[in-house]
Image: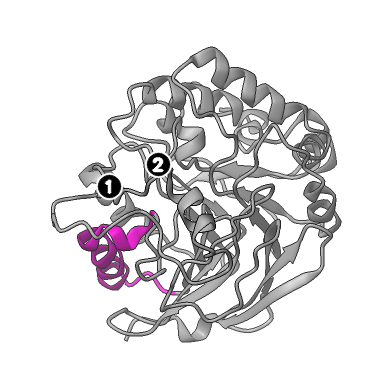
Amino acid sequence: MTDLSRRSALGLSAAALAVAPAARAATVDAPHPALDRALTRIAFGSCANQSKDQPIWDAILEQKPDLFVFLGDNIYADTRDPKVMAAKYATLAAKPGFKRLRDTTPVIAIWDDHDFGENDAGGDYPMKVESRRQFCDFWGEPANSARRTRDGVYAAYVFGPDGRRVQIILPDLRWNRTPLVEKTFKGGYKAWAVGHGLTGQLTPGPYDRIPDLDATMIGEPQWAWLHEQLQEPADLRIFGSSLQVLADFPGWEGWINYANDHQRLFDTIRRTRAERLFCISGDTHYAEISTLNNNVPYPIWDVTSSGLTEVWPVTPPNARRVSPVLRERNFGMIEINWSSAAPLVTVRIHDEKGAVKITQVVDTGTLRVA
C-alpha cells in the first residue's frame, strides 16, 4: 500500500494531504507505520443527522485537532434500501463544515445503530453486509482492508513515535450483537416520557436487564482480536465505544446491558495489563463523564459526547456519573500533555459555539494494573 492510500484510509482528502504530507497512519492489525507526529489534540463526537444544519464543525475546526474520531451515528440511515443509505452519506459529504474538516484533518470512524442501518439494530439486521461496504467506501478503506471482510468494522490505530504512542481502539457493537430486552410504552418511549412531564428528570429508558449470560455485543472473533490489540505497545490507549461503557443501567443501550461482556472487558484489560486506558463514547444525545473504581484493574473513565446535531430531553439515571449532564449540541476534545513520564490528559466537552462546559483531568500514571 502506498503512503497516499494509507492516508486516504484515514479519511483525508487531497487538500488535507497537501497540508500534512508527512502524515501516515496504521491499523495495529495491519503492517503499516504509525503517524509520524505525536498527537496532542484529539476531537471526537457522535450523532450527526445529515438532514440538519451542522454549524458545530466551525467550533471543532477552531480547536485545530490533530485527529477527529467519529463515534457512530455518523449518518441517520435508518433504512433497508442501499440507495437511501448512499444518498444520506452523500448528504453528509456535502456538508460544508464536515467537508472542511475532512479536507484538513485525519478522520477515523466506527458506526453505531443509525449508520449501521436501523435504530438499535443488532446482528439480525439483514442489510449489514451492504452497510459494511458503504461504510468502508465512504471512510476510504482500501480494497484489502480487514474491515471489509471480517465480522464487523472494528479497527485499532496507533499514532506517534515510541514514547508518545497513542492507540485508539474502535470496537464494533452491532455486527454480532444479540437482541435487547425491551419494555413497552404506549405511544413510544419519548411520547410517554414527555407526556408524563419527565423532561429533564432522571428517567430510565425502554430497555431492561438481559438475564442471559450468553448474550453478547461483540462475539468471540472480536474478543480474540481485542485481546491481541490490548497487548500491543502503547503509551496511552483510548477505547472509542459507540455506546457508553460505564453508565449504570440508564435503560438505554450500553455495555451494562450485557453483563458478561461488561465484566469481560475489564477482565481483559486486567489480564493483558493494558495500562493508561480511558474510554470515550457517544450515542446518548447528551454529554457526561462517568467513572468506575470498584472491581476494575484501575479507575476507568468514560467521557460521553453526543450529539453533534441531536439533543435528548430526558436524563437517564447513571450511578457512575461524576459530572453535570449537558443537554446541548456538543463535541469532545482530548488534550495530551507529554511532558511527564505518564501523560496528563485533559478532556473537555464543548458546546456548539466552542465554550467549555465540562472538564476532567486524568493523570494516566494512576491507570496502572496492580
Label 1: element kind? loop
Q: Is residue 353 above or below residue 247?
A: above
Q: Is residue 322 above or below residue 287?
A: below
Please state, as top left, top right, bottom left or bottom right, where the C terminus lies in the image.
bottom left
When asked about the image quadrant of residue 166, the answer is: bottom right
Sequence order check: which comes first, mark 1 or mark 2? 2
When asked about the image quadrant of residue 246, the answer is: bottom left
User: Within 10 angstroms of label 1, few (less than 14), some, or many (20 or more) residues?
Assistant: many
Q: Judge whether residue 144 can be spotted in this image.
A: no
Q: Is residue 312 left or right of residue 151?
A: right
Q: Amino acid at mark 2?
A: Asp
User: Within 10 angstroms of label 2, few (less than 14), some, or many (20 or more) residues?
Assistant: some
Q: Position of residue 162 (x, y in %)?
A: 56, 64
Please state, as top left, top right, bottom left or bottom right, where the N terminus lies in the image.
top right
Query: Which residues are the magenta region?
Result: 253-275
Q: Label 2 belongs to which residue?
A: 120
The residue nearer to you, when weighing 175 against 257, is 257
Q: Is residue 92 left or right of residue 151?
A: right
Q: Position of residue 65 (x, y in %)?
A: 75, 56
The residue nearer to you, when weighing 203 against 230, is 203
When asked about the image quadrant of residue 324, the answer is: bottom right
Separation (CA) of disc 1 from disc 2: 9 Å
Q: Amino acid at mark 1?
A: Leu
Q: Is residue 353 left or right of residue 269?
A: right
Q: Is residue 156 above or below residue 74?
A: below
Mark 1 vs 2: CB contact within 8 A: yes
Q: Is residue 302 above or below residue 57?
A: below
The residue nearer to you, when weighing 127 against 232, is 127
Q: Is 208 colored magenta in this rendering?
A: no
Q: Position of residue 204 (x, y in %)?
A: 40, 64
Q: Label 1 belongs to which residue?
A: 180
